[in-house]
Amino acid sequence: MPSELSAPSVSGVVTSEEMLATAHSIVAQQEESGAIPWFTPLEGVPGHVDAWNHIEAAMALTVAGLHEPARRAYEWLRSVQRPDGSWPAKWVLGEVTEPGGESNHAAYVAVGVWHELLMTDDDAFARAMWPTVRRAIDFTLGLQTRRGEVIWIRHENGEPSDHALLTGCSSIYQSLRCAVALAEQLGEPQPDWELAADQLGHVVAAHPEAFADKSRWSMDWYYPVLGGAVRGRAAAERLASEWDTFVVDGLGCRCVSDQPWVTAAESCELVMALDAAGDHRRALELFRTIQHLRHEDGSYWTGWQFENKRHFPGDRSTYTAAAVILAADVLEGTSPGASLFKEIAGRPLGPSEAADPDACGCTLISVANPIRTRL
């Protein structure tokens, strides 16, 4: 496993040393157990942990060359997985505070493990994590409807919620593609997972009616592109359609459309979505813009309320630092994991035809010009 520190840089924007400092700001908040909370205690309120953001932080640590804390993060995640394959939605100081299991939280371990394998070429690590990934994907697909969307949470009493989320399902699409690649790499192919991914990707790209309306959130705008289900002209049109709604010139991307608040994490995810869609120029410009949220110690403020002209909500978060590091890696484009949002195991991410057209009521979808033909 590589031992040298090799944090990414972006010419004229951030140096490798600056990104390494950002990674160390994540490690500074890692708990003794290996868990990575959103932030250190803020005004007496401790930061919470969830599996998705924890994994994103671990990925960023690996990108920066901080392998030991990254591996502690994965070992903690493995050790606290529940028998059904899920993780609680939230912990605070090691105590479960929200026990429901979210589907995209569970699925994302496949992205983390695949990314770690790409970055370190450590087959033994991937094999050790395989049972964890397999249980997590089985849990996730236990929440997939016949049409193809994945319900967002299974509550503590075992009952699923009554709706799916576009952002979560877009992330799950990428997770399933990583899980399929990992299974093939380890000699345990899972064709049912691939069919599930095909159906989900089609629904994300072509069936907005399958999802609860969260359109005020910028993530619902760009995540279908970031997760890989939307590409080509459809991606360009989608990003153009709400650009003026969510992007504030000189400041970054809003978290929600109706609040004067830009956030570094959403901005950097949008950077990666733009790059995946082939718009490297705007991706670089946006990454440069968001540097106004960098703190002198290398961490990043979560957001900026531009009417009140103050940092909001007032914390410097690990998931924000992680998003910055991952975006820098994507823009630099030189690490083995930098193409994670473009292709998986040599296969470009992109829309897929429905594995079961009867389930969603259509037989054909053109990526460039979605036209549904009823059966």
Image: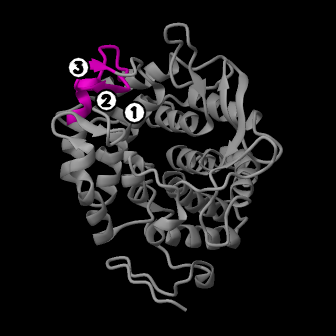
Q: Position of residue 338 (x, y in %)?
A: 40, 49
Any magenta on residue 291? yes
- Tell me the amino acid under the disc marked 1: Ser
Residue 10 visible within the image: no
Mark 3 or mark 1: name the one nearer the start of the chain. 1
Q: Secondary structure at mark 1?
A: loop
Residue 55 visible within the image: yes
Residue at the disc numbered 2: 16
Which of these two is toward me, 208 or 139? 208
Mark 1 or mark 2: name the one nearer the start of the chain. 1
Residue at the disc numbered 3: 309
- Tell me the amino acid under the disc marked 2: Ser
**Classed neighbour count for the residue bearing mark 3: other residues with Cα under 10 Å, few (<14), some (14–19), many (≥20):** few
Q: Secondary structure at mark 3?
A: loop
Indicate left or right for 209 with 154 as reference: left
- Tell me the amino acid under the disc marked 3: Lys
Marks 1/2 in contact by CB < 8 Å: the verdict is yes
Q: Position of residue 141 (x, y in %)?
A: 70, 60
**Classed neighbour count for the residue bearing mark 2: other residues with Cα under 10 Å, few (<14), some (14–19), many (≥20):** some
